[in-house]
Image (tube, rainbow, N blue to C red):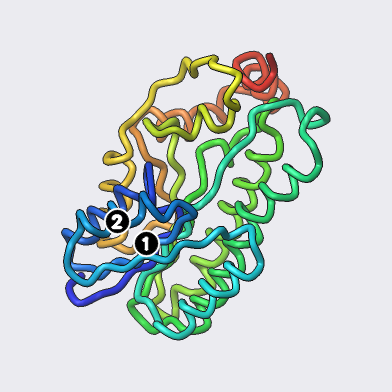
Amino acid sequence: MQNSNALITGASSGIGLVFAKELAKEGYTVTCVARNEEKLRRLVDDLGGSHRLIRADLTDKDDLAAVSQEIHDTRYSLLINNAGYGIYEKFENIPIEKIHNLIQLNINALVQLSHVFLNTASAGAALINVSSVLSLLPFPGGAVYSGTKAFVTNFTEALWYECKDKEIYVMALLPGVTDTDFHQVALGKTRTKETNRPSYPPEVVVKEAIRALKKRTQPTVISGPLYKFLAILTPRILSRARMVKIMGANSPGMD
């Protein structure tokens, strides 16, 4: 992995930040993209060397166009589409503008950046799209979020097949509950209900992804031992209706 370059969206915190640190250790020159320039500067300063930052809001068409142009011009060997967020609330209670914004970031921006990357990528390049274990499950109280991630997983797995003969590796990364601020952002500032599901540090997610990146065989990587087990077992023992009821009963967005 020496002498490679990577662009990571959503790099200012959580999984994206850990990706930046771990890939820098692996010899990548990293370009970190996020909205918070202050956090990005701290990260790039910590990384040292020739790592770069781009302050961009990928829900803004001009910022998205600028990052797309950057990918086109620089011809990165690795793109990690990590930027995304969720909203935990009943669908009809979410303002439609917020729903459109969520879809713009989680789907539209990811698709656009994937498209420009794959049109410039050479053999040996790789694309990682960060999805979620919730992409495999119906999630009342988070219907739009889980729906966007279902798109990301299916879209990315299809790209894996399309690109494998060109020796371009594509991975759908499906974290379970992770120790980041994602859950609180999804709940909103005025709600504090904690998830009762097991949580893993972002370092676990990233290290599993990097191991899979080196092997370049799996289209889908589910991170966290428990979530791997549940993803395999749950559809085999529960009907779809039962699964929806269980997910709804335990969803913080249904309160």
Vertical side of 203 occupied by 55: above or below: below
Residue at 42%, 66% (x, y): give it. Answer: 54
Q: Tag 1: residue type?
A: Cys
Image quadrant holding the N terminus, namely bottom left
The numbered dot on residue 20 is: 2
Find residue 246 and report its image quarter.
top right
Sequence-first tag of 1 and 2: 2
- SS at mark 1 in the image: strand
Q: Is residue 169 left or right of residue 63?
A: left
Vertical side of 62 occupied by 213: above or below: above
Residue 172 showing in the rendered view = no
- SS at mark 2 in the image: helix
Residue at 83%, 30% (x, y): give it. Answer: 92
Across and down, in percent, residue 116 comes to 54, 77
Across and down, in percent, residue 132 comes to 51, 42
Vertical side of 162 occupied by 109: above or below: above
Find residue 202 and report its image quarter.
top left
Within 10 angstroms of label 1, few (less than 14), some, or many (20 or more) residues? many
Q: Give the number of the mark in front: 1 or 2.
A: 1
Which is more toward the observer, 34 or 226?
Answer: 34
Q: Are marks 1 and 2 in contact (CB under 8 Å)?
A: yes
Image quadrant holding the C terminus, namely top right
Q: Which residue is mark 1?
A: 32
Across and down, in percent, residue 17 comes to 33, 49
Q: Tag 2: residue type?
A: Ala
Residue 104 showing in the rendered view = yes
Residue at 36%, 49% (x, y): give it. Answer: 39
Which is more toward the observer, 253 or 157?
Answer: 253
Residue at 28%, 53% (x, y): give it. Answer: 43
